[in-house]
Amino acid sequence: GMSGGEDVVPVGVSFEVLADLRDQAVAKSENPGPLRTWRHWESPPSQRAAGEHLTTEDMCHEVVMPKTQDQRCALVDLVGAELKGQATVFVSHAWAYRFTDTIAALESAGLHTNPSSRVWFDLVLNSQWDTARRPFEWWTGTFAGAIRGIGHTLLVASPWDDPQ
């Protein structure tokens, strides 16, 4: 439980890390994606077509999980120390959005102009291997405390004037 002490400020990554992922998303979009077999509710599973943008969900399965498969770790664990540090902004976004749109929104907010910005972005910071459901207390305690500790939240809505 929470001891009522100081909120812990979690780690974040530089915008460079997210820009690199965006570039990988653009490159991957040229070819069709794998069957989305992780979507247990789809029968038969859907597949991203060649030329179709990757969503953050697609990025998880097509980029992050293959990269972290051997260590079964979070992507942040494979990032150089110079590209991470105390998070300065928490990004709230939907995994159904195009990943390139989400990163463009961070650019619109000017995150790419400040080299000391460190972004908490769930795809990178959370292990996608240990996805057992978190208890409600974790969300209301640890997680809420971490967001308070970061002090800035950037909400990504797409499209911004009529979010889906």
Image (cartoon, rainbow, N blue to C red):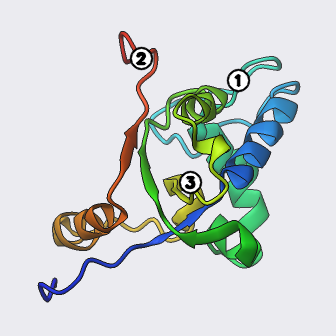
Mark 2 / mark 3, whichever is N-terminal: 3
Q: Position of residue 111 (x, y in %)?
A: 58, 43
Question: Where is the C terminus found, in terms of image quarters?
Answer: top left
Give the secondary structure at mark 1. Answer: loop
Q: Which kind of residue does numbered mark 2 sit on?
A: Trp
Q: Which mark is residue 69?
A: none
**Residue named by callout 3:** 123
Q: Which kind of residue does numbered mark 1 sit on?
A: His
Dot 3: within a 10 Å radius of its alpha carbon, few (fewer than 14), some, or many (20 or more) residues? Answer: some
**Which residue appears at 83% of the width and 34% of the height?**
28
Q: CA distance from mark 2 to mark 1?
A: 18 Å
**Residue 106 position by quadrant:** top right
Q: Which kind of residue does numbered mark 3 sit on?
A: Leu
Q: Image check: 137 left or right of 122?
A: left
Whether 24 is drawn above or below 134: the answer is above
Dot 1: within a 10 Å radius of its alpha carbon, few (fewer than 14), some, or many (20 or more) residues? Answer: many
Q: Which mark is residue 160?
A: 2
**Residue named by callout 1:** 53
Farthest left residue?
A: 4
Out of 24 and 40, give the one closest to the viewer. 24
Name the front one of labels 2 and 3: 2
**Residue 73 position by quadrant:** bottom right
Q: Image check: 142 left or right of 83?
A: left
Question: Where is the N terminus found, in terms of image quarters?
Answer: bottom left
**Which residue appears at 76% of the width and 59% of the height?**
66
**Which residue appears at 52% of the width and 40% of the height?**
39
Q: Position of residue 89 (x, y in %)?
A: 44, 54
Q: CA distance from mark 2 to mark 3?
A: 21 Å
Residue 128 can be seen, yes or no = no
Q: CA distance from mark 1 to mark 3?
A: 17 Å
